[in-house]
Image: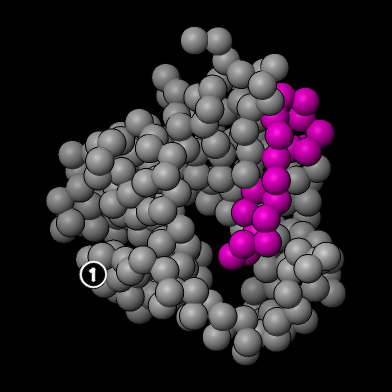
Amino acid sequence: MLGSVLPFTPEVAERISQYCEENSTKLPASITDHWQWTSESFGDADKMSSQLQGQWMIFTAQDRKPKRILEIGCYSGYSALAWYEGTKDTKAEIITLELSQVMIDASRATFEKYNVNDRIKLIQGPADESIEKLTGVFDIVFVDANKDGYEGYVKQILDKKLLSADGIILCDNVFARGLTVGKDVSPSLSNAVRPYWTACGRALARFNEFVVNDGRVDVTVLPLFDGVSQIKWKESAKPKL
């Protein structure tokens, strides 16, 4: 296959997504239940990662065996639960950042319900201010917050050398429902949310350009989910131990 993306219709893409979920290692019932509860409880639950993405997070954490994970954007706590599940062996510390009081309350209740406060630390406030106060290094950094903040957040992480020498930054939604690539890429997107995602697309186009031109890192943009960027240090730029 010379191309990188199969030309699925939305209907076929939904079937493919379901097929992938069914043929991937199942999520624990607690995480599935929380995903369902979030979907039914919040009008903007579309911001939450998919069930397949949760499966991917668990797999990624199990494979990379991180000691510390930083999550920028907690929402209802679904992704933090996935990172927790994926690091049961390494007992990784998970720090997750959130601004919204509504989602802070939801996440705190979630972490209490599932008894995961032993390794998950939730920090409330603007992400840039929270990042500035962080110390040490993180092996996985997952960015899924306000899209106009991505460039600043990743730059902070790199400038402060918060990413470990062999760590990885994973940035979600870098396609902005396709509108990063072009205004004509997502014709079926609802007019109610199109202005929001159009603005996100402009911000993420600038972000993608910033990362690929930053001489300290290597990046691969993958057509997974709503677009995922994988960012790591170049060998010559790795922090010295």
Q: Residue at x 71, y 34 (%)?
A: 218
Please state which of residues 111 and 66 is positioned toward the viewer in this rendering: 66
Q: Is residue 105 left or right of residue 170?
A: left
Find residue 38 and report its horizontal and vertical position in percent: 35, 70
Report which quarter residue 180 is drawn in.
bottom right
Q: Is residue 14 above or below residue 116?
A: below
User: Label 1's element?
Assistant: helix
**Magenta stretch encompasses residue 95:** no
Q: Give the residues in magenta.
A: 210-229
Q: Which residue is mark 1?
A: 29
The residue at 53%/51% (across/down) is 144
Asked whether 58 or 50 is in front, the reply is 58
Q: Is residue 174 above or below residue 133?
A: below
On the question of residue 100 being in view, the answer is no
Along the line of sight, which residue is nearer the eye, 236 or 70? 236
Colour mode of the rendering: one colour
Residue 49 left/right relative to 183? left
Inspect this view and state whether residue 58 appears.
yes
Q: Residue furthest bottom?
A: 11
Tell me which residue sits at (64%, 74%) in the image. 193
Q: Residue 35 placed where, x, y %? A: 34, 69
Q: Is residue 213 within the magenta segment?
A: yes
Image quadrant for the N terminus? bottom right
What type is the residue that disc 1 sits on? Ala
> Pointer 1: residues within 10 angstroms few (<14), some, or many (20+)?
few
Q: Is residue 118 left or right of residue 48?
A: left
